[in-house]
Amino acid sequence: MAALAQMNGALWQDQARCDPHPPLREDLAVDVVVAGGGITGLTTALLCASDGRRVALLESERIGAGTSGASSAQVSVVPDAGYRALLSRVGASAGVTYLLRLSAALEFMDALIGAERLDCEWRRVPAYWFAADAAGWARLQDEHSAAQRLGQACRLTQDVPLPWPTSGALQFGQQAMFHPVQYLAGLARVARDRGVRLFEQTPVTGWEEDGDGIVVRTPAARVRGQALVLATHTPLGANVLQTEMQAMQSHILIVRTAAPLPPAIYWDTAEPYHYLRAVSDGGAAAVLIGGADHKTGQGGAPGRAHAALSAYARERFGDAVATRWWSAQLYVPADGLPYIGRSPLSHHVFVATGFAGVGLVQGSMAAMELAALLRGEQRESPWKATRMRAVAAPRVLSEGIDVARCWVGDRLAPAPRRGLDALGSGEGQLMQVDGHKRAVYRDEAGRLHVLSPVCPHLGCLVRWNGSARSWDCPCHGSRFAPTGEVLEGPALSGLERTASSAPYAGMAPVTSAAAAQQFDADKG
Ligand code: FES
């Protein structure tokens, strides 16, 4: 299978678009401000508007451009960490409550699609959690008994409709798959019809709370409201919840195959696991294969994930042709449950995060929970954002150690003393320039972009991601474009430009001496 040189974007985002909306240009007063135009934000906005609240939704880029639109489009209520882990971490009572709410969220999506006639290829399908070997099968037997204790309907089976032998599977009925961008486009239309004010290209840059509510800042205007919902995948800005989650990247490969995969969703017992579903790619039968997960900013050599997924595809589908490759971020919570509700240390800010690998259904569940909270319902729930579980402590501690290791270690690590002229077009690298460590990127036109490598979130140093062409922060998952703008994560601002790129335009190859001269001139 030929390797794709670089990621080329999510299938769903190329196949469909949401209607465009203007940026926010004038101050506004509403009841609820929602930041984020993915499944959580749009559903929350729709539900709040249906309750009669005035709602403004602010999306930093385009609606559907984030993780919901780049997901695997598998809607499953099976918890990411499995039933055994759920039971041991949160106990049977909280586990049952959580699973019931997840199922309710999936049925809510089903009902909404029917009621609003959302055209999004929604299809209820079975799911197979399959084993590749005897150890995997033993684990599934364990998971089956834990699932039964948690009241989940599933069964062990040897009958798995994959075109290669397995050691059996745990089978679930009535899961779903769909086209996520078509779904988001439909949600946005319904939300707009219910009165939600939708704004794109409108990042939230900060907020102030006072006794009366909250004022949310954006580049051109402010929005006053009673509540700000951060439906931004991870809370924006510094939030204690970031110490309780791991930011991960998962990779997705689309391969065209001779025969379609039977309609179902599939994932295996490997670590990290692989997930699969059938898709249509340009009218041809294709399979979506995901996996090769790693911590954000710690993915190793460019192309490593692609090579791993290609090898997996080649072994199972022979000479299938790879057509697409992209990655999506996820946040894995320390105790296995998402964080939904009022943000710690805040009165008017609400969060929904820690969805791990089941964000589509958890995002819908979060929206239902948040809408209930905002209409004043008092809810005791195991996923409230202010919880503290002793079972999470070892994972929080190990995450803290990893962040400290990155924060200190990356500062002490010497940047290569490679000349700027050795940097090829489309490449980025941390380099020693003018006696300082810099994040340097050369664009396709030969221009150099010289940035501070310090992540504006909490000060870790970013690392170059050669597959996605982005600067990724290994601490809490902020990601930046090669030219420094925020792509995702908690950072509220981009990487600082340390020198104008303009003087270097068209000067390739550029010498480090020339760059040093320019820095000296800039410093005056
Ligand atoms: Fe927290 Fe970069 S995302 S320091």
Image (cartoon, rainbow, N blue to C red):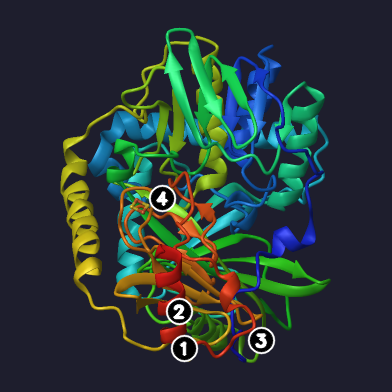
Look at mark 1 in the image and give the residue it sits on.
511
- Residue pictured at 28% horizontal, 41% vertical: 87
- Residue pictured at 53% horizontal, 67% vertical: 482
Q: CA distance from mark 1 to mark 2?
A: 7 Å
Q: CA distance from mark 4 to mark 3?
A: 31 Å
Look at mark 3 in the image and give the residue it sits on.
320
Image position, residue 127 (x, y; %): 56, 56
Front label number (4 vs 3): 4
Q: Is residue 216 above or below residue 267?
A: above
Q: Amino acid at mark 3?
A: Ala
Q: Which mark is residue 331?
A: 4
Mark 2 is surrounded, within 10 Å at the Cα level, by few (under 14), some (14 to 19) or many (20 or more) other residues, namely: many
Residue 274 in sight: no
Q: CA distance from mark 3 to mark 2?
A: 46 Å
Observer-nearest of 503 and 266:
503
Q: Is residue 296 above or below residue 123?
A: below
Q: Earlier in the sequence, mark 3 or mark 1?
A: 3
- Residue pictured at 25% horizontal, 68% vertical: 410
Q: CA distance from mark 4 to mark 2?
A: 38 Å
Image position, residue 407 (x, y; %): 24, 59
